Image (spheres, rainbow, N blue to C red):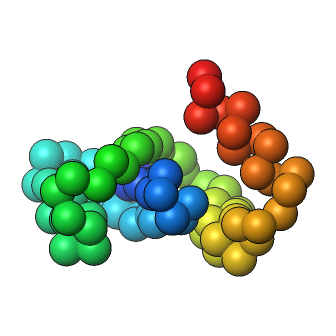
Amino acid sequence: MRHLLAAYDLSRDRLYGHLKPRKRRGEFLVFLRYLRTLYPPGVRLGLVLDSYSHTEQASMIRRYIASRNRNTRDHRLGKIINRANVA
């Protein structure tokens, strides 16, 4: 079992993710401390916690995060993100 700890920076339109073998309070707090080193306390971040158990799925998630961050100016992707931000 692997766990994805992820954060989405609304102002920069960036995703950050760490894969961990466990998802307990300690791992979560370490991830939050890492985020705070990147941004001042006033910056609003959306946090996502998800778990999965397949190597292929982990690879797809990493590729999606990298691809999404490379294509932040893509208009089709922007429309999808804007719809998700409204919900």
Q: Considering depth in this image, is 64 or 3 the residue closer to the camera? A: 64
- Residue shown at 69% from the left, 44% from the top: 81
Image position of 29 (left or right of 6): left
Tally of marks = 0
Q: Which of the 4 image quadrants contains residue 40?
A: bottom left
- Residue shown at 76% from the left, 51% from the top: 78
As drawn, 77 above or below 48: below
Q: Residue furthest right?
A: 76
Q: Considering depth in this image, is 72 or 26 the residue closer to the camera? A: 72
As drawn, 79 above or below 31: above
Which quadrant is home to the C terminus? top right
Q: Considering depth in this image, is 87 or 33 the residue closer to the camera? A: 87
**Residue 34 in view of the camera:** no
**Residue 29 in view of the camera:** yes
Q: Residue furthest top?
A: 87
- Residue shown at 26% from the left, 67% from the top: 39
Where is residue 45? Give x, y as percent. 36, 49
As drawn, 16 above or below 54: below
Image position of 14 (left or right of 24): right
Q: Considering depth in this image, is 26 or 2 the residue closer to the camera? A: 26
- Residue shown at 27% from the left, 49% from the top: 23
Where is residue 38? Give x, y as percent. 27, 73
Where is residue 36? Give x, y as percent. 19, 65
Where is residue 80? Give x, y as percent. 77, 41
